Amino acid sequence: MKQSCRQCQHPGFLLGLLGQLLIKSLLLLLISTCAYAAGTSPKLVDYSHRVWTAHDGLPHNTILSIAQTQEGYLWLATWEGLARYNGSTFKVFDRNSQPALRDSATVVLHTGQKGVLWFADTRGNLGRWSPGNQIRYWGKPEGLPDAGIDGIFEAANGDVWITFNGLGLGRLTPTASQFKLIQPQNHTQNFVGIRPTLDRTGRLWVGSLQGLLYVEGNKLLPAPAAFNLPTGVAWPYQAPDGTIWIVAGNQLYQLNDTRLQHIHTLPPELRVTALLQDHYGALWLGTENRGILRLSEHGLETVGAKMGLPEGRIASLIEDQEHNVWAATNGGLYRLREALFSTVGLQTGLSNAFVRTLAEDAQHTLWLGGSGGLDAMNPVGSIRHIPLQPSTDKQGDVSVLSLLADGHTLWVGTYGDGLYELRNGVSVRRYGRRDGLLSNHVRALARAADGSLWIGTRQGVFQLRDGVIQSLNTPGMPSTLIHALLDSGRALWIGAQSGLYRYADGSASKIPLGDAGEPIRALALYLNPTNRALWVSSDRGLWRLLNQKISHIGIEQGLPIDAVFQMAQDNDGSAWIGSNRGVLRLSYLQLREVANGTAPRINAEVFDNRDGMSNAQVNGGAGTSTLLTHDGRVWFATAEGAASVQPQRLLHYRTQSAPATVVEGLLVDGTDTPIPEQGSVNLPAGTRRIAITWAGLNFVSPQSIRYRTQLEGYDNAWTARGNQHLAEFTALGPGHYTFRVEASIGDHGSMGQAAVLHFQIEPFWWQRTTVQAIALLVLLLAIWFIYRLRMRSYHRNAERLELLVGERTSDLQRQTLALQHANEEKSTLAERLREQAELFERQAYQDALTGLPNRRAFDTVLAREFANAHRNNQPLCFVALDIDHFKRINDTYSHAIGDLVLKTVGQLLQNVARESDFAARVGGEEFAVLLNDDRIEDAQTMCERLRENFHATQNWADIEGLQVTFSAGLVRLSTGDANPQQLMDRADAALYQAKRDGRDRICTA
């Protein structure tokens, strides 16, 4: 009995007890007759809906008929024109369009053979729209009766059957331009023909206000008396599988060949105006004023105002090639699309669209809390509002932030009214500041392992035990806004505005996430039941805590956004996460691999409005905003209701084929140009600008279509166009071109069949091939003539040149001999100049007397070695040497003897110095020696050896008894020597000291 009552609360149950009986009987009907069913149809809640009106581009809100042609266009008959819909925009054809209609008010549509569309207007004109925007009319001028048209049907042989208001049934053979009118047996001026249809046997059935009719030869006869149809309105409907349904009054029949089977008696007040059998085999019934009914294995469900259906008559129902259901209504074009996500919102009974938190109790009631208070949805979908008394005298409902279902108890945390305790859906107590809460802002709730309740507020965490609230003011606990609480049994995990905390055994500690300088907000917590991994959702991605190790998954690892909210894991191993930009679906196995470091990036799918969500903003940071319910469905709290997804339907939903693509328009230098169905468009010479528009005919997710184009004859490469619908080409040369456009769903989907447009730009007369060939021939003849003239002149000049060559040859020979002699003299002079240059270069850097380098060479080497020693921290010793009493030698023996002494000194220096040392004469009797990589002791040894050689030399300059000595100053490079001059100054000082001490000695400094 409880289950029956629960069924009576279903939102699709609008017809009371009579409707319940209808459900049961029609279910039996489906079991026995729907052998055509193609599969299990989804529940009505799994459809998303949308309405298009004049605000969206329709010429009029009242849709009188709908049809879809072979290429995929959706056509709509309205009072203000014929509208063609490509999934993105409406193209309206009326008396002012191109092509133009005879009358804008279009009332009847029918999809014919070979992709044509038959239509009729209020003035009795019958039109045939062929691919390529070609229209042919039949009306009063072409021999048709002057009467309104109620119905059209094209047979397989090409004959068109037309019902004329007040006259009868017409048969038009377009190929032979033959027309014949068949009047009913009991002809009346009130005749209205409804939906002519052929059955499998080839018999034509026609509905009318007086009952069902059929054609026998050239007669329009009433249905056989054996059918025993009720009097009044009756009309047929042919399903895609060929099944003929008959609606007669309030009776529903099936016609099998010539046998009529009664199916069901409909309620007398339910007037059916349209029928549709979808690809699942479910039957959709459009009504005069009761919306749309769907009959399937789920029972009889109602599509009404709660699902956005405009009020009024349903004139037509069709299912398109992508299995969307379309309805022609008085209030616009209505579509039901099987979507991955469905939404429970205002139209389905929620008290407020802004949902913040979700919970499911043991009775499978879904609780929804938001800015408008608390709602409960039972397992069959009925929603009721649960009033909560505010803590003050303010008007309206409380704002709910968090929910926790615990058996028959529901805990409700609010924005400013504290904590409510509900039992069996009734509020029994409210906890606030007087009960121990420091803040009535309750954002998070969790059941403790000992049965108490954890409460997260704006001012920290509290514990409710046996009706008493205590504050957890343990050192280390956060006192800021609490976003989430999770009791793992061993510890209480706290997600706060200031980060993540752990509370256990009376002590609290903060768990560092990320860099210490960047605070991380821990917005939600999820504990994996298998491996006890704790997942933290934050404003910087996901964090995993496992075995005392923290791993991070953020934008760098593939998450599409920074801030993520509550995680839930479905039964198929996928993790679902809400965010401000939609719902993320990730493989939990891949999440674990990235966290373990065995995979570099995560692949995330993002779902949003395109997938059926009313609003892609999922709320978070308070309560449970993502919830896995008992039936495997995942729910999300969003800014416009609660969105849900059944993960098992994901594979079916994602298998979308590439859309058909059509070229819609060709604009040549600003002028709209017709496009033929076949062949090429010829464009005049001098065409400067060509604009081509196209569309991918997709009604499921047109915003996801991506295009690419190619213009063969100009550039054979494909050009990615994104979601653009226009390509422009300027200054194309004359020739043949083939334009192709392909479409795919998404950036990585497979491309569908290309739409092709051939066009040719005619050349100017001077660009024609024949003209250019003649011009080329004339040019070649002119070139040949000029060539012949030049060759004749060439031969004359050759003879004259031959004489001149003989005369000049002897002159050249004489000149050659003279040049050879001059060249020899030049070589000799050059050799002398080279030798002189080498001598000058040596003199510039060498002392001519001693053969040692001079002062100029020494300064260069000293600067270089000084820099190297400083840079590489190497030792460098410098010796300043002066011949003792050299002036006395010059004065006593002459300057010539002095020069011989200097030569001898130079030789002694060269004998003592190593290859790496550098000795030079830097003045008259002054010499200097640089010693690389030597210690001061080694340098002093060298100086002593030189002094011994001086003493060993007897009779200097062959002067008997002449003895020569020297005084020297020796220094080693120190860190205080800023430049070479300072080093030399120190050596000079040591030299002067040697002279003061009596000469013939070496002093160091």
Image (cartoon, rainbow, N blue to C red):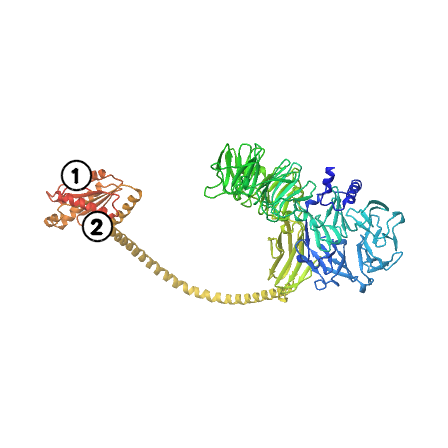
| Residue at figure coordinates x 11%, y 50% from the top left | 891
Identity of the amino acid at label 1? Answer: Glu
Q: Kindly tell me whether residue 73 is visible in this rendering.
A: no
Nearest the viewer among 966 and 206 is 206
Q: Earlier in the sequence, mark 2 or mark 1?
A: 2
Q: Which residue is mark 2?
A: 848
Task: Answer with left or right where residue 425 lies relative to residue 823.
Answer: right
| Residue at figure coordinates x 86%, y 47% from the top left | 258
Where residue 262 appears, as percent x and y from the top left, is 84, 45
Disc 2, SS: loop
Which mark, by number, is residue 948? 1
Where residue 118 appears, as percent x and y from the top left, is 76, 57
Nearest the viewer among 434 and 972 is 434
Q: Within 10 angstroms of label 1, few (less than 14), some, or many (20 or more) residues?
A: few
Nearest the viewer among 546 and 996 is 546
Q: Is residue 710 above or below residue 564?
A: below
Disc 1, SS: helix
**Distance from Cα at disc 2 to Cα at disc 1:** 26 Å
Which mark, by number, is residue 785? none
Where residue 84 appears, as percent x and y from the top left, is 70, 57
